[in-house]
Amino acid sequence: MAQSTFDRRRVNGPEESFSPVFDEEDDAELGWTVKHGRGLADIRPIFLQPGLVSQANGSAYIETEKTKLACAVYGPRQSKTTTYSERGRLNVEVKFAPFSCVRRRSPLRDAEDRAVAIAVYQSIVSSICLELFPKSTIDVFIVVIENDGIEGCIASGSIAASTALADAGIEMLGLVASCSAGVRGDEIRLDPVEKEAAAADGTVILACMPALSSITNVYQSGRVSVQGALKCMELCQDRCIDVHAVMAQSLLSSRTSTG
Amino acid sequence: MTGLSKVEISYIRSSLLSDPPLRADGRAPEDFRPIAVETGVAPLANGSARVSIGQPRAGRGHEAEGAGGGTEVVAAVKLEVDGVGDDEEGGKVICSVSCSPAAYPHLSSPALDDLQSDLTSLLGSVLSHPSLCPQNLVIVPGQKAWALRLDTIVFADAGNVVDCLMLACRAALVDTRVPSTRSVEYRAPGRQSGTLNEVPDDLMDVDQSRNGPSSMLETRDPSSAVDFELADYWDEGKVLESRDSWPVCVTLNMLPTIHFLDATSQEETAVPLRLHTMFSFPGGKPTSHGMRMAGAGTSDMTQIGLLLKHAEKYARNMWIGLEAKLAEEEARRSVKAREKFYGGRRR
Amino acid sequence: MSVVPDEKKPTPTNQVQSDELRAQIFQRLHPHAYLDRFLVEGVRPDGRTPEEWRDAFINVGSVSTADGSALVRIGGTTIVCGVKAEIAEPELDTPDQGFLVPNIDLPAICSPKFKPGPPSEEAQVLSERLNAALVSTQLLPLTTLCIEPGRSVWCLYVDATCINYDGNAFDAALLAMVAALRNTTLPVATYNEETGRTTCRSRTTRHPLSLNRDKLITGLSFGVVPTPSVPLDPTAFEEPLLIRAFSVVVDVQGRVVFVEGGVCGKSGTDYDGDEGSTLIEKSIQAAQERAKILHQLLQ
């Protein structure tokens, strides 16, 4: 059911349409049994490229297997609101492309966009020296091109946003790396794909600044024991050090290649 | 709260960090304001509750401005019949939070919308998680299920609105009764008359006169059922299956060396970082249903580990308190209902 | 006596930097004059001649959640297009025709001039133009999307999202949409008379769309500036300075299938008949040349 209302601002399709239904599910790999040749504590390889959006002050494109998203930073620019603010304002907007999920997403903004945006905002807000940008707004825009699990999406979004902020030359305390984990029983898997996350009892997303060993965001959903959650966080934090290295390397090589 | 000045913030912070910590209303760091819970406040809903934190008590009128009132939330559960898609199990929980503009007079309407959607997504991400979906929301497997709409309204916000919301949601969900249903199947009349022809005439007459035209609807085993009807006898319905899993929330407000609970609006503005933790204790075993960080501060592993241990303890106290209160409410209401029932008959 | 370092004296690198800065300020304050200065010399700010287009790049099938997808880059402009196939009931007056629903989104990420929220005017106009181009050319006969006449048809949502906007989104979006449609495969669907439901047999058996091979279209957009030259494939900087912009869409054989133009930016002088027709002829020629290159890329 993609479009329930007529929208004059777009080319409209039929009033109702449905995702195709399949007689046989030839997808043998379901849920927790997904095979992807990764160890439990391995994350998907990260391809990270800063500076792809030439119109923006800073940008980054990240691809972790099937999760693909682009992020651009505009600003610091003048705030639209007239009230004086001593600190800069950070604004994060996330948009899923209509074709980014298994079911087509209506192009209208929905709750999930906002939920991902809040999580990414929380991950990066404490890393930016907002006190240096009075009266200004820093806009971070993310477009999800392909989504393979909301957990990976939030983690990748945070990584891309932090890289794009660095690419824009905005003063930060440190780069924010992020990693997610899924728990089922006693087993913890890092960076779960969509099917794994759906089959997990609970998930944890951690964002941290490895350079300062400080944590900027913890986002846990589902059912997890306290010990399990803490164990996930520790594993994620370890992995974030590797992610941090990837981020630093990609920023470095983008600088040297462009001079 | 709208912005506090730097001086006000540093005043609140320094008094919280002093030894012993000082709060404007004289509470200790881990003290809550008085919490009031009342269930069954919306007669047309399947379950409802009103929760307020920190209603002014007699002789407490001198409290600082803004903290004078309390945080007040009403949550109501409404069950709606919903079709089930092919790849779904059926049954879902849909949360929504609306904030009364009177609770946030300083917010513009887009800012209020943002706040509402933020709270909605926070509640939704915890309560609509598939691991919490009650099994008995399914009416006819693969065909129909109840969609549980959990609507909450924030009437007043004097700080700590998330804890208050979660308390109200848990109370309303515990209060919820799912109406009893039975599955029915449509039987073609032709087939029925065919079988009826074989029975003696007198029996057939009896059969028809008894059932009339409604004989097309028969109660059947659920596998071939296509529709359902409500059980026609008076029944309160059943409680939700995951009743003891709906979590409560404890928000830890963090200052560099201390943490404190149940912040007022001013205190909320003054702390750099908050950690919302959602716990449930099914069978006494602690389970974490959600953790969210909010604010521009940072933390570290050891601090979070320590805080979670504390949070679990606070949440357990709150859980036990709420359980006792809910049991009391249930008893009060069943007494009231009985009185009403018998009283009406006697008159 | 304190020694005051002589800041005024330009060192060579200093000189280059300040010249660059001055050029940037000039570009910001007087964009028209800035562009004119270039065009008088027969080049454009990005080093192209007015009759030169930017290199195009196509990558197809990278989005696995879509039934067909393509990423197109023309110069800096980057557009991702994904096709999602859904099942719908046909319209009463066209019981055997499916739906083709092209839309382009110009989100805030792609350029500072777009704001988050509902589609901007530019996006709405662009969607309409793309729709007109795709429908008028009959690239995809809608009858091929029929599953069961009057009951069930395919509805193809062709959504293009701009990631980086550096002018001429029409050409890039059209190319992306055509490439994504070429890449699209549909599962085999059957309509069940008894249940009234349409189901697909399996996820793996899929067939490509029956596109009209000789109607594969490509576009080339032009802009007219007051000076007598026609910049092809305008960039984001040039676009607002054009007095007229139009697009020519040609098919594989080079036949013109769609010409569309209009006044944009500041309206200028009208062309009289002769001048106008030579202009159109010239641009059609260019579009045909461009089409050959793009078709090679599409293959």
Image (tube, coloured by chain):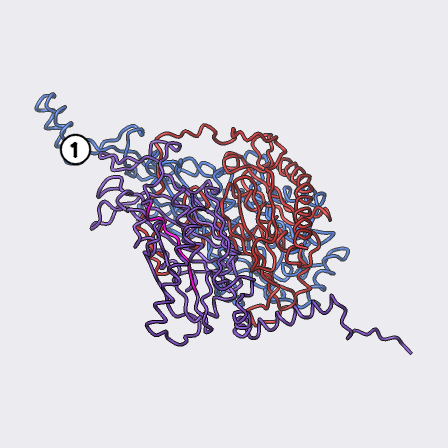
Chain colours: A red, B blue, C purple
Residue that carries the numbered disc 1 in the rendered image: B211
Q: Is residue B85 magenta?
A: no
Mark 1 crowd level (few <14, some 14–19, many ≥20, 10 Å Cα) = few
The residue most toward the right is C1
Residue A228 position (above or below residue B112): above
Tell me which residue sits at (18%, 36%) in the image.
B214
Q: Is residue C88 visible?
A: yes
Q: Position of residue C232 (x, y in %)?
A: 46, 62
Q: Which residues are magenta?
A: C214-222
Q: Is residue B32 visible?
A: no
The residue most toward the left is B201
Foreground pick, B186 / C260? C260
Task: Please identify the quarter of the rendering in which residue A36 is found.
Answer: top right
Q: How many marks?
A: 1
Q: Chain of mark 1?
A: B
Q: Position of residue B277 (x, y in %)?
A: 60, 46
Foreground pick, C58 / C254? C254
Is C45 situated left or right of B86 in this image?
Answer: right
Q: Is residue C217 magenta?
A: yes
Foreground pick, B197 / C243? C243
Residue B164 position (above or below residue B281): below
In the image, what residue type sits under mark 1?
A: Asn
The residue most toward the bottom is C1
Is B144 situated left or right of C44 in this image?
Answer: left
Is B195 situated left or right of B311 in this image?
Answer: left
Element marked by disc 1: helix
Q: Position of residue A205 (x, y in %)?
A: 60, 43
Q: Position of residue C276 (x, y in %)?
A: 36, 70
Assign the N terminus of chain B to one quadrant of the image. bottom right
